[in-house]
Image (cartoon, rainbow, N blue to C red):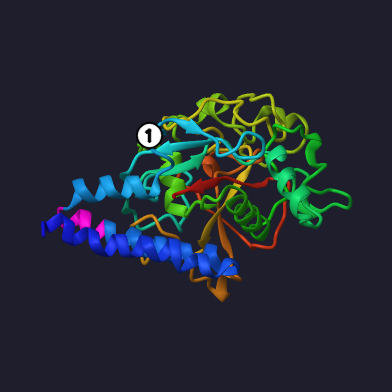
């Protein structure tokens, strides 16, 4: 048997486990698939390092990418009405975190580490919209509680503010006022409806998608003055309405609150709103260092009581200053919190 064929055997066994064993326990299928996927990611990363790149990468793409008629860089939907539009990203490597001399960096953005995304990854072209989320709520009857509102000084619960009426949004605005549990319920519902494996991005997948092969502070470069062409953040329009924190950028993006998805320029992967508009929940539990973080694209799943079992949010939001919109910037939130700057983006890997 050829050397590459020997290495493919355990990978195929893992894939078979995911399709068969995980399907026997529908209530835990998403968790089961996530664990098996993580094992597959780590094995493929090891195999690539050992010199099996060509056959394994080709096999991995055929197993985990969307249908064969889709290609890297192409967008698609799994259904016409309620499914998010997805973009297929290429496999690759990047350095997570920020260099010590990056202005505005946080102390939890180190040590920098090289992460290998050894698989084609489909990522939402936009944050999940109100229309897409409304289909889930209507179909399941999922109940969402009240929402924290940013008034320019602090977040506070405001009576009568929910995902369905926050910020005078239209159907094409990103959904807000969703917590981590709401986001998990949504991706599990989407998986059941489509028969595909939808999930939140891991934190490293998110930064890989946001950077889009760049190493600059923002995916548009190192000049914060260009923000208003690429991102809806804290700016002069927010300042004029009294909803901007100190440190807003000195340009006008014309949206003091959320903007319709796709209103600004995309990054090099063709993804919109990866900085600003809404913060995006990711899968990971929060750790204040990357020292023990995975390097294969999988999520950190050991939550720590000292951080109140917090989860990570990425991307900043409509009320974020430039430092919080950097590709490496991390936000830490309690998973039960809903706020009018919290949203989500989805991934698909099967």
Residue 228 in the magenta stretch? The answer is no
The range drawn in magenta is 45-51
Q: Quadrant of residue 110?
A: bottom left
Q: Residue at x 37, y 45 (%)?
A: 101
Residue 27's x, y, as percent? Answer: 60, 68
Find disc 1 in the rendering and name its residue.
72
**Is 125 rendered above or below residue 340?**
above
SS at circle 1 = loop
Graded by Cα atoms within 10 Å as few (under 14), some (14 to 19) or many (20 or more), the crowding at tag 1 reads some
Q: Could you tell whether 229 is left or right of 11 in the image?
A: right
Residue 13 located left or right of residue 256: left
**In the image, residue 88 above or below residue 307:** above
Considering every residue shown, the one lying at the far left of the view is 2
Q: Position of residue 113 (x, y in %)?
A: 32, 55
Q: Kindly tell me whether residue 294 is visible in this rendering.
A: no
Judging depth in this view, the residue of 253 and 191 nearest the camera is 191
The residue at the point 26 percent across, 45 percent down is 58
Question: Of residues 288 and 300, which is closer to you in this image?
Answer: 300
Residue at (65% x, 58% y) in the render: 185
Q: Position of residue 237 (x, y in %)?
A: 71, 27
Examine the residues drawn in magenta and state their main secondary structure.
helix
Q: Quadrant of residue 9?
A: bottom left
Task: Please state if 185 lies on the left or on the right of 15 as rendered.
Answer: right
Q: Report if residue 26 is visible in the image.
A: yes
- Give the camera-side residue of 160 and 92: 92
Residue nearer the viewer, 117 or 208? 117
Q: x%, y% of residue 339?
A: 72, 51
- Looking at the image, which residue is at 27% across and 65% down? 10
| Number of on-image labels | 1
Left or right for 259, reference 207: right
Q: Quadrant of the N terminus?
A: bottom left
């Amino acid at each position: 048997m050829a050397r590459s064929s020997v290495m493919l055997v355990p990978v195929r066994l893992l894939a078979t486990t995911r399709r068969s064993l995980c399907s026997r326990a529908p209530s835990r299928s998403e968790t089961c698939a996530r664990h098996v996927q993580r094992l597959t990611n780590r094995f493929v990363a090891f195999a690539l390092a050992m010199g099996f790149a060509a056959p394994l990468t080709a096999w991995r793409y055929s197993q985990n990418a969307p249908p064969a008629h889709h290609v890297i860089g192409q967008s698609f939907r799994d259904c016409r009405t309620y499914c998010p539009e997805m973009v297929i990203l290429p496999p690759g490597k990047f350095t997570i975190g920020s260099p010590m001399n990056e202005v505005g960096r946080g102390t939890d953005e180190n040590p920098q580490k090289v992460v290998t995304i050894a698989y084609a990854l489909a990522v939402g072209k936009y944050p999940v919209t109100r229309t897409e989320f409304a289909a889930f709520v209507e179909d399941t009857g999922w109940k969402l509680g009240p929402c924290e509102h940013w008034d320019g000084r602090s977040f506070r619960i405001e009576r009568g503010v929910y995902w369905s009426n926050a910020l005078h949004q239209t159907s094409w605005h990103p959904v807000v006022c969703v917590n981590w549990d709401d986001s998990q319920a949504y991706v599990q519902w989407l998986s059941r409806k489509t028969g595909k494996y939808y999930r939140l991005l891991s934190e490293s997948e998110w930064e890989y998608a946001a950077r889009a092969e760049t190493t600059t502070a923002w995916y548009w470069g190192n000049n914060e003055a260009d923000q208003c062409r690429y991102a809806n953040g804290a700016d002069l329009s927010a300042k004029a309405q009294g909803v901007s924190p100190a440190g807003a950028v000195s340009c006008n993006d014309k949206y003091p609150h959320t903007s319709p998805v796709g209103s600004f320029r995309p990054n090099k992967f063709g993804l919109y709103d990866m900085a600003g508009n809404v913060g995006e929940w990711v899968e990971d539990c929060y750790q204040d260092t990357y020292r023990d973080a995975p390097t294969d694209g999988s999520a950190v799943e050991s939550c720590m009581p000292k951080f109140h079992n917090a989860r990570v949010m990425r991307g900043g939001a409509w009320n974020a200053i430039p430092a919080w919109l950097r590709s490496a910037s991390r936000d830490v939130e309690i998973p039960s919190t809903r706020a009018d700057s919290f949203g989500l983006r989805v991934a698909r890997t099967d």
